Image: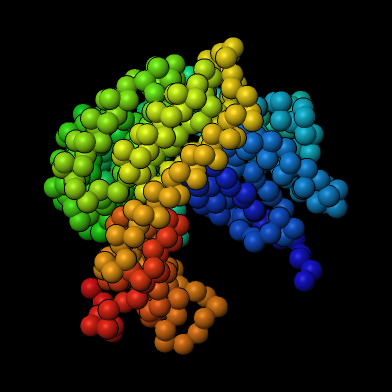
Amino acid sequence: MIMTQREKGFYISTYGCQMNVNDSDRMATLLEMADYSPVQTPEEASLIIINSCSIREKPVHKVYSEVGTFRKLKEKNPNLKIGVGGCVGQQEKEKLIKNQPIIDFVFGTDTIDSLPQILMDLENPPEGRSQKIVRAQFEHRQPYHVETLVTNPGISTFVNITKGCDNFCTFCVVPYTRGREKSRPLKHIMSDVQTLIKRGVKEVTLLGQNVNSYESDCGADLADLMRQLAQQTSIERIRFTTSHPKDFDQKLVDVMYASQPKVCEYIHLPFQSGNSNILERMNRGYTREQYLEKIAMIKKAIPNVVLSTDIIVGFPGETESDFQDTLSLVKEVGFETIFAFKYSPRPNTKAAKFEDQVDEGVKSERLNRLFEMHDEIAFELVKRYEGQTLKVLVEKADTLMEGPTIKLTGRSTQNKLVHFLGAREWVGSTVPVTITKASPAVFRGEVPATFAGGLN
């Protein structure tokens, strides 16, 4: 099929964290307000934006690789505009254009709202200025006022409540690519959620690099925010990510328990390393013992809680004994899901300058061992769901299937992806699904015969 380019068609390539996904939604809405239209492929676009991630080294390389794949498109159409945003744009700035001259503009994480103006300036550059544009300044002194711009949010969507981070973990580039920590006013978030509800949203995920350090200008913290959302709006489900263990307190746990079933019983709580000495070198602000105390506090208040975590393998100075501490912590806690990565030195971070870097081969071998060990645990942990009936919020239907019964996909309150057969009109509704087959990645189930035909 021959693709024809749209005069003002945009294509956004997104990778990285949930914050980047949310940022791309904002970009798309801003572009549509500026009379651009989304297209399905780069070949159809007159504007291509790469919304990038720099939390690890590989995604940075991906930006350069992806720009290279667009070179032929630029050769065929010199009017094609290519831009790079996200954390790589914030981190690399002018260096991107120097290394990849086909890039027309670079913008940072604090300048997304200026995207329409950037495009106008590209079309009509001010006299005496370069045709290339780089805008990646932080607005440190400005309050964090940002509207959730999602025109078609779907059943579940993200709501930014904080940006940036003040923790300066020695491995993390976020303070340099997202800036210092800021929180949105509580009343703005409440207004956003009310608007999203009117657009059909049933579930929101409160989003921030360190979401549980949220503090509104009125003094409200994350627990206060969740309590108000649960009590004063008709939103059906509330999630939040990503939490920092040092900021996870009893008040938050109590509000989670009191606000169920609206607040889901799923917590993502990165521990990064199971060894206290490595945690100190990471500047995480807690010990192994303190992390386990937080887990005990959570499990006591919410016995049905489901836990996931982030882990870094091969941090500078990590010995085999230190790594064994990580393995033992994973076993002790019983995480149903882990996100684990080899340590990658990032620009401007303290750990990149540590002299006792771990050999890449050792990192890879340890990471493989971690995944193999966790696979055994995870398969055993999820067996408990087989035969259980979970409440599943239906997010989408298979568009290729026809007839009264089609394949549906949704998530349970435990954050489990569930496939089952049902009616197309169930999309957007919460239905009971009895799990027939559970694996760590996806569940399969069926709706009880007593429910078929009725929606709750």
* Residue 309 visible in the snapshot: yes
* Residue 197 visible in the snapshot: no
Q: Position of residue 292 (x, y in %)?
A: 27, 31
Q: Residue furthest right?
A: 75
Up/down of 360 relative to 168, above or below: below
- Residue shown at 22% from the left, 51% from the top: 304
Q: Position of residue 222 (x, y in %)?
A: 25, 37
Q: Which of 84/286 is in front?
A: 286
- Residue shown at 18% from the left, 53% from the top: 260
Left or right: residue 138 versus residue 376 is right
- Residue shown at 55% from the left, 40% from the top: 368
Numbered disc total: 0
Residue 144 occupies quadrant: top left
- Residue shown at 62% from the left, 50% from the top: 12
Q: Position of residue 86 (x, y in %)?
A: 57, 37
Q: Residue furthest bottom?
A: 403
Residue 411 occupies quadrant: bottom left
Up/down of 59 relative to 151, above or below: above
Q: Specify the color scheme.
A: rainbow
Q: Position of residue 146 (x, y in %)?
A: 41, 39
Q: Quadrant of the N terminus?
A: bottom right
Left or right: residue 246 versus residue 108 is left
Residue 417 occupies quadrant: bottom left
Q: Which of 197/170 is in front?
A: 170
Q: Quadrant of the C terminus?
A: bottom left
